């Protein structure tokens, strides 16, 4: 692999070669990490360009979009359901939603956007999946830090911050996007029409995930239905991280982790089993 982190076009040789029989696990593990790192570097350059301006724009674009939406909705809904600042209330809902949405869409296109590289045995379909996940996860992490810190400083807010709850919500949102995106990566490959159907089915998610309300404020009939939406749990945990008085007792991290894990295992299994078909397109 070249020193600049780009992927080599030749299969690796020597002690770092993958051993199909399972021997020499240390070099194999190290090689997988090298391939994954190179994939992340390549994805970064492909998506954002190789200049510093591209990296900055990668963070500024979603950050600016969230700030504009926050400003618009703050005029329409001056009094949030929780606290006294709508901008922070909305941001605690939209950040985990955008992380899930960005990761799931990016991962779903992992194989289709890397078919050329997947013709080399050193790169596996799961390498492309994980590289997409890592890049979007880290990008949204930077967006979240800048947005939350900026809002708190700009409005002079006093926040009883629970880093554990906020971090848990962020990680769960990323895992949920990874699991769903991995399964859709296979489904989109076999059933191209499913992409259009899925886009239609998921449009109401923005309104069904607690962006503008709290779960407890809904009627019991609505709570019984929306509880099955994993994003409701994630948003609740994120808000519990910023509002000390808010108790998201309905939120179940194990439920979200279970859904994410099941989706990912099914998707990863199908991806490995039908890799050659998906690569050929």
Image: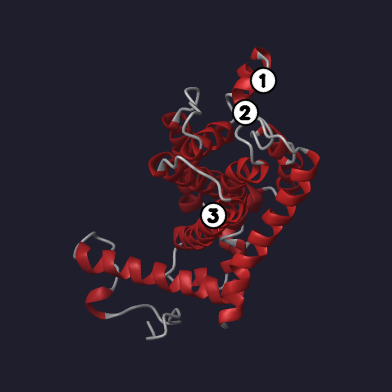
* Contact between labelled residues 3 and 2, with CB atoms less than 8 Å apart: no
Contact? badges 1 and 2 (CB < 8 Å): yes
What kind of element bears circle 1? loop
Q: What element carries label 2?
A: loop
Foreground residue among 160 and 133 = 160
* Whole-number angstrom distance, CA of label 1 to CA of label 2: 7 Å
Badge 1 density bin: few <14, some 14–19, many ≥20, Cα 10 Å? few
Q: Is residue 114 left or right of residue 258?
A: right
List the residue tagged with mark 2. 214
Camera sees residue 263: yes
The quadrant in which the C terminus is found is bottom right
Residue at x 65% of width, y 42% of height? 90
For the residues marked 1 and 3, what is the alpha-carbon distance in whole angstroms?
Answer: 27 Å
Q: Position of residue 66 (x, y in %)?
A: 68, 54
Q: Which mark is residue 144?
A: 3
In the rendered image of this protein, does residue 146 appear above or below residue 47? above
Q: Quadrant of residue 89?
A: top right
Q: Where is residue 254 in the image (x, y as percent from the top left)?
A: 41, 30
Quadrant for the N terminus in the image: bottom left
Q: How crowded is mark 3: few (under 14 residues within 10 Å), some or many (20 or more)?
A: many
Image coords of residue 26 (percent x, y): 20, 65
Q: Pick whichever of labels 2 and 3 is earlier in the sequence.
A: 3
The secondary structure type at the circle numbered 3 is helix
User: Could you say where residue 248 lies in the image, as x and y percent from the top left?
Assistant: 50, 27
Badge 1 is on which residue?
Answer: 218
Residue found 55% across the figure and 55% down from its top: 153
Farthest residue, direction top: 220
- Residue reaching furthest to the bottom: 3
Q: In this view, does 148 lie above or below 30?
A: above
Q: Earlier in the sequence, mark 1 or mark 3?
A: 3
Image colouring: secondary structure
């Amino acid at each position: 692999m070249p020193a600049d982190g780009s992927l080599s076009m030749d299969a690796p040789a020597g002690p770092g070669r993958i051993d199909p029989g399972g021997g020499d696990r240390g070099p194999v593990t190290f090689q997988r990490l090298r391939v994954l790192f190179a994939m992340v570097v390549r994805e970064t350059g492909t998506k954002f360009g190789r200049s510093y301006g591209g990296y900055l724009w990668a963070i500024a674009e979603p950050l600016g979009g969230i700030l504009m939406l926050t400003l618009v909705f703050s005029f329409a809904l001056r009094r949030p359901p929780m606290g006294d600042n709508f901008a922070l209330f909305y941001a605690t809902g939209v950040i985990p939603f955008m992380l899930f949405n960005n990761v799931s869409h990016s991962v779903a296109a992992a194989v289709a956007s890397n078919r050329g590289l997947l013709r080399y045995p050193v790169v596996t379909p799961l390498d492309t999946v994980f590289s997409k996940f890592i890049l979007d996860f880290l990008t949204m992490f930077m967006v979240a830090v800048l947005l939350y810190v900026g809002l708190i400083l700009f409005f002079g807010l006093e926040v009883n911050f629970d880093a554990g709850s906020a971090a848990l919500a962020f990680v769960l949102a990323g895992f949920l996007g990874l699991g769903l995106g991995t399964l859709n990566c296979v489904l989109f490959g076999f059933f191209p029409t499913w992409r259009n159907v899925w886009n239609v089915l998921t449009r109401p998610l923005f309104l069904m995930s607690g962006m503008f309300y709290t779960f407890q404020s809904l009627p019991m009939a609505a709570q019984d239905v929306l509880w099955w939406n994993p994003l409701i749990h994630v948003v609740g945990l994120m808000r519990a991280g910023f509002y000390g008085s808010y108790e998201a007792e309905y939120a179940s991290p194990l439920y979200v982790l279970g859904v994410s894990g099941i989706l990912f295992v099914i998707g990863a299994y199908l991806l490995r089993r039908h890799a050659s078909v998906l690569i050929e397109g």
